[in-house]
Image: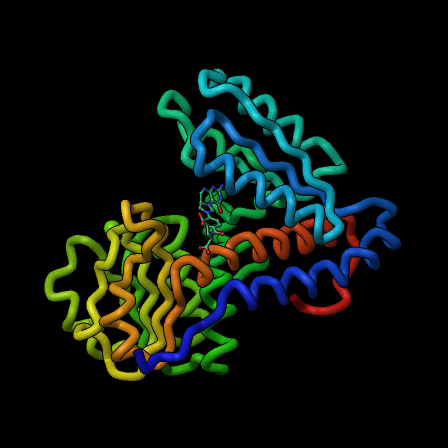
Amino acid sequence: MSAELIDGKAFAAGLRARIAEQVPAFRAAAGRAPGLAVVLVGEDPASAVYVRSKGRMTREAGMESFEHKLPADTPQDDLVALVDRLNADPAVDGILVQLPLPRHIDEQAVLTRISPDKDVDGFHPVNAGRLVTGLEGFVPCTPLGCLMLLEDRLGDLSGLDAVVIGRSNIVGKPMAALLTAKSCTVTLVHSRTRNLPHYLAHADIVVAAVGRPHFVQGDWLKPGATVIDVGINRTDAGLVGDVDFDSAASVAGSITPVPGGVGPMTIAVLLRNTLVAAHRNAGVPLAADI
Ligand SMILES: Nc1nc(=O)c2c([nH]1)NC[C@@H]1CN(c3ccc(C(=O)N[C@@H](CCC(=O)O)C(=O)O)cc3)C=[N+]21
Ligand SMILES: [Mg+2]
């Protein structure tokens, strides 16, 4: 191992502390706390763990957490009706509907129902459009967290070659848009890409979001590259990323671990987006950029 570790867990703790520092000013100006509503449908144990830690960290930051747990067989209309009530509730600044949803529910029908101004996940097509056109909106938490780690490590990203692996709406596509906005030369590769190592050989930045354990090999990387591993794969050996950590760490300049890398950033950015939403929704300017 010669790469430096990018400590996402520590960075996320610092970000949450900076958010918590700004909450009292919002409370004083608005007369209420910023509020985040989290909706969980069904009993998926991993989802239940995430939702619990989101609630705890929301409260630790001084914000209000509204948790809605619905049975797995909840009709889509009931879920949509709940989203409508949360859209109309002035105590709720951000709404997160935990994914994946049970199979009988049309995910897009639910996500597009969330008011774009409360869409702290940044999954609504209006916010996706705002991101690619450079308008103010909400950016999905995982790619924004990756960008924060990259800028902390590398400073100005302008002119760097970036390869994003994976083209999901949640990570790959918004990540490519963010890096493009930061003037990187971005290549988006995916499962149908021929000769993936060809593209990686030139990449100063690699963001891996493929959902395949240990997929990215160290000998594909440019020596000194900065590697961000978005993968959360549960295997018999525990939680592993999309990057083959041991081989990658001997070639990369710096690399995020799994766990302790991108995952904690996702929740910290969710709190950041919620604080930003609260200020926008209440018409209270934010004192400092976070
Ligand atoms: N509407 C919605 N928004 C999401 O942002 C969302 C979602 N649905 N569904 C599930 C995925 C997954 N996700 C993670 C959040 C934190 C960690 C995290 O904190 N991971 C820790 C360890 C977790 C563990 O040990 O299991 C780490 O990587 O160090 C991981 C994954 C948010 N998601
Ligand atoms: Mg793919």
Asked whether residue 130 appears in the rendered view, the answer is no
Residue sitting at 34 percent across and 74 percent down? Answer: 205
Residue sitting at 47 percent across and 25 percent down? Answer: 42
Q: Quadrant of the N terminus?
A: bottom left
Q: Position of residue 77 (x, y in %)?
A: 51, 18
Q: Where 142 sits versus 39, above or below?
A: below
Q: Position of residue 52 (x, y in %)?
A: 58, 39
Q: How many marks?
A: 0
Q: Position of residue 267 (x, y in %)?
A: 55, 52
Image colouring = rainbow
Nearest the viewer among 5 and 142 is 5
Q: Position of residue 183 (x, y in %)?
A: 42, 76
Q: Where 13 sits versus 106, above or below?
A: below
Asked whether residue 146 appears in the rendered view, the answer is yes
Nearest the viewer among 26 and 50 is 50
Please indicate whether residue 30 sits to the left or right of residue 257 in the image: right
Residue sitting at 19 percent across and 72 percent down? Answer: 199
Q: Quadrant of the C terminus?
A: bottom right
